[in-house]
Image (spheres, rainbow, N blue to C red):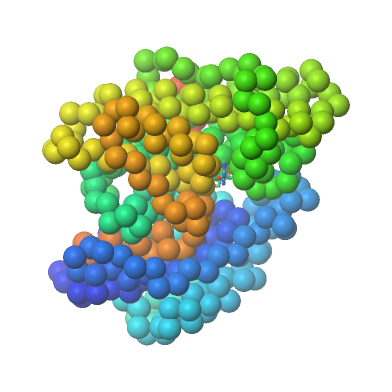
Amino acid sequence: MTISSPTAPRRTLVLGIESSCDETAAAVVARDADGRGYILSSAVRSQFKQHELYGGVVPEIAARAHTTCLDHIIAAALAQAHVKLADVDAIAATSGPGLIGGLIVGAITGKALALAAGKPFLAINHLEAHALTCGLTDGLPPPYVMLLVSGGHTQILFVEDVGGYRRLATTIDDALGEAFDKTAKLLGLPMPGGPSVEAAAIDGDPRRFKLPRPMLGRADPNFSFAGLKTAVRHAAEAIAPISDDDVADICASFQAAVCDTVVDRVAQVMRAVVHRFPDDRHRPFVVAGGVAANQVLRAALVGVAETFGYSFHAPPLSLCSDNGAMIAWAGAERHARGQSDGLQAPVRPRWPLDADAAPAKGAGVKA
Ligand code: KG4
Ligand code: ZN
């Protein structure tokens, strides 16, 4: 349930807590009455060392790790921002989608702090936080087209307003970050997979392996990456044992296939929604989520935005992957609109941004 209150103070300080996957993070952001945002602190602890042995994120280990360090991360965020809990106007915590154990740890901690300090609590949708980050970093208000590419999601959204999201495309199987992670694992590269694949690809030949471009040219703008992942496996098996040069060429070829596919899908949407912008000279395109840190993909997206007359926006690298600032900012945006959530707000492992979006047909559709 969302509760509305009539007034919001001029400058708000919000503490944000993130624990939906394998990053424990907290931050304090300020939001001025004119909508401008400032990061006063941002503390992040990644758990990837704890999961490395298992080749992927283990939910139980993640939840325990959040429990162990969340208090310290929150204390660090408050200390770096030179504020006390009593100084913040609201407390925001990721409440979905994500791994349920971690979500419970973060949300319960946020609620306990809110109750103890007598502050409003905001249950934040992690995808909404990624979607609104460019408001904090670029001062960019909706409407905009957004590509959200993370470990669990691959979507193109039309962001009409804060709280108004239309899903225009989604993956019918794997998320793009997942495809990077699985490719890395298959090639014996360390976690986190995306940055490893990108680093290995730097010296590689993107033309050596003819990998498929799934969905290229299809009328609907959805994504599919499961076939690409399988093609990578076949390519690696066909030349086993693989050398470092082979790994570099496979990674570069994989990235090239990803870029061609994503650019084609994004172009499809850009064409289709061109008329939805009130000002023809101002059509922003935003990319966010962990995979948005990939420089090759970013360059490809700059190109497609230019072709279709969109301005390109992406968060700085440190705010592409999961962080507390984006959660605090989503909280600040909602708080500025007089919203808060009760302490009974549930955690939601699945929490689509656009509840009305028709389900996409595919093997393992992500909401
Ligand atoms: O947004 P995020 O930090 O967490 C989720 O909400 O899922 O995204 C994590 C994903 C992982 O799959 C990771 O491998 C990928 O983002 N990633 C990258 C890069 N940096 C992180 N993928 C490709 N290139 C990168 N440089
Ligand atoms: Zn994320």
Look at the image and tell me whether residue 293 can be seen. yes
**Res. 106 visible in picture:** no
Image position of 149 with respect to 118: above or below = above
- Residue at left 64%, top 37%? 202
Based on the displayed image, in which of its 4 quarters is residue 333 positioned? bottom left
Tell which of 200 and 77 is nearer to you.
200
Image position of 22 (left or right of 3): right
- Please provide percent x and percent y for residue 203: 68, 35
Residue 185's place in the image compared with 333, above or below, is above
Q: Quadrant of ligand 1?
A: top right
> Which of the image's four quarters has the N terminus?
bottom left
Counting every numbered tag in the picture gives 0
Q: Where on the picture, by quarter, is residue 312?
A: top left
The answer to whether residue 360 is above or below residue 347 is: above
Residue beneath the point at 60% across and 55% down: 22
Nearer to us in this view, 210 or 47? 210
x and y percent of residue 301 in the render?
41, 34
Q: Position of residue 263 (x, y in %)?
A: 43, 27
Question: x and y percent of residue 2 in the render?
Answer: 27, 59
Q: Could you tell me which residue is drawn at 58 percent across and 30 percent down?
A: 255
Residue 183 horizontal side relative to residue 164, left or right: right
In the image, 144: left or right of 49?
left
